[in-house]
Image: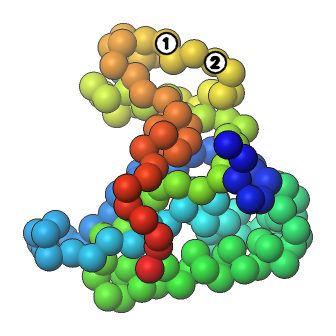
Amino acid sequence: MRGSYRKRRIQLPPRFGHFKPAGVPKRFLEKIDLTVDEFEAIRLADYEQLEHLEASEKMNISRPTFTRLIEKARGKVAAAIIEGKELVIEGGNIDFVNTLHHCRECGEVSPRSVDEDAEDCPDCGSPNVEDLAWHFSGRHRGRRGRIR
Ligand SMILES: [Zn+2]
């Protein structure tokens, strides 16, 4: 089934998908979902320091849509670090251009095109390599409901 808006293009999956305040047991934490497209907006505007127009073109969305997206994303990250919430990156109507292959044995991360199959780790030779674009591509979605 199609979403109600076109897919947002993501250059690279997040390397880490889960952040929490140190020293607080998970059961006491409220969770905030940052969608992968919100994460990408922060990466492009605040990390790569791109102008909103350029960033919006990379994501295949309009500039006003990008501006709304980055404002929502910043609000969530701010709430997480100020209020001490668990921040989980997941979901979004997204399409990856590139991926990262992450070795679960040694932690090596290698950039790849999304068309390439995961091979044994180039560093340690382990076959236990996960494709992070696959991990973040929405198959783990559902159940959690709407974002606060
Ligand atoms: Zn490895």
Q: Is residue 106 left or right of residue 135?
A: left
- Location of the N terminus by quadrant is top right
Q: Is residue 101 left or right of residue 61?
A: left
Mark 2 — residue?
116
Q: Label 2 neighbourhood size at 10 Å, few (<14), some (14-19), many (20+)?
A: few
* Residue 18 vs residue 44, the one in the foreground: 18
Residue at position x 68%, y 27% in the image? 113
Amino acid type at mark 1: Glu
Amino acid type at mark 2: Glu
Mark 1 — residue?
119
Which x, y percent locates residue 134? 52, 34
Q: Quadrant of residue 74?
A: bottom right
Which x, y percent locates residue 51? 83, 72
Residue farthest to the front? 1
Residue at position x 49%, y 29% in the image? 131
Residue at position x 33%, y 19% in the image? 128
| Helix, strand or loop for disc 1 | loop
- Location of the C terminus by quadrant is bottom left
Residue at position x 66%, y 28% in the image? 114
Which x, y percent locates residue 106? 30, 28
Image height check: is 135 above or below 88?
A: above
Pointer 1 and pointer 2: residues touching (CB < 8 Å)? yes
On whether ligand 1 comes within 8 Å of the CB at mark 1, the answer is no
Colour mapping:
rainbow
Q: Label 1 neighbourhood size at 10 Å, few (<14), some (14-19), many (20+)?
A: some
Residue 82 seen in the figure: yes
On whether ligand 1 comes within 8 Å of the CB at mark 2, the answer is no
* Residue 147 vs residue 123, the one in the foreground: 147
